[in-house]
Image: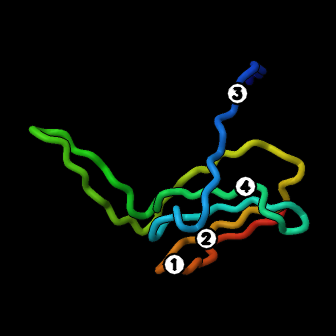
Amino acid sequence: MYDKKIVKGKLKSIPTFGDREALQNDFVITLSDAQGNELIKQSVEDPLNPEFESYGDTIERHKMSLQESEFSFRFPYSDEIKSVKIERINNSKKQVLFTQNF
């Protein structure tokens, strides 16, 4: 049995950024309209090289290197959004990883 509940809420704002703010190996996700105009553009930290913290006498950060990884991206629904593109920043160049038209 499934239950459905609708409540009033507020969606967090999506920060805008320029290409300079994206770091090496970060993913850039672009949502576009039917004409190819960018509606939303957001960066995601590299999911293949996550950083973990360990706690002992001190807090230490460790980077892991993964062959595969899952990540999610949330955005407000809009009828205008017709495509999503995921790119990876490598040496100031963008490599297209995924494109999907709706």
Question: Disc 1 versus disc 2: distance between alpha carbons?
Answer: 12 Å
Horizontal relation, residue 56 to residue 51: left or right: left
Q: Which residue is mark 3?
A: 10
Mark 4, other Cα within 10 Å: few <14 / some 14–19 / many ≥20 = some
Number of the label disc, if any, that sits on residue 87: 2
Q: Position of residue 25 (x, y in %)?
A: 46, 69
Q: CA distance from mark 2 to mark 3?
A: 28 Å
In the image, 33: left or right of 47? right
Q: Is residue 67 above or below residue 4?
A: below
Determine whether label 4 and label 2 are within 8 Å by CB.
Answer: no
Q: Determine whether label 1 and label 2 are within 8 Å by CB.
A: no
Residue 90, how many percent across, how many down? 49, 77
Residue 72 drawn at (x, y percent): 59, 50
Answer yes or no: is residue 1 visible: no
Label 1 secondary element: loop
Query: Which residue is drawn at the image coordinates 59% and 78% (left, top)?
Result: 95
The residue mark sitting in front, 4 or 2, is: 4
Query: Dividing the picture into quarters, in which one does residue 6 lie?
Result: top right
- Classify the position of the C terminus by image quarter: bottom right
User: Circle 1 is placed at which residue position?
Assistant: 92
Q: Image point 64% across, 53% down: which residue?
A: 16
* Distance from the alpha carbon under mark 3 to that under mark 4: 18 Å
Residue that carries the numbered disc 4 in the rendered image: 40
**x, y (%) of residue 97?**
61, 73
Query: Of callouts 4 and 2, which one flags the residue occurring earlier in the amino acid sequence?
Result: 4
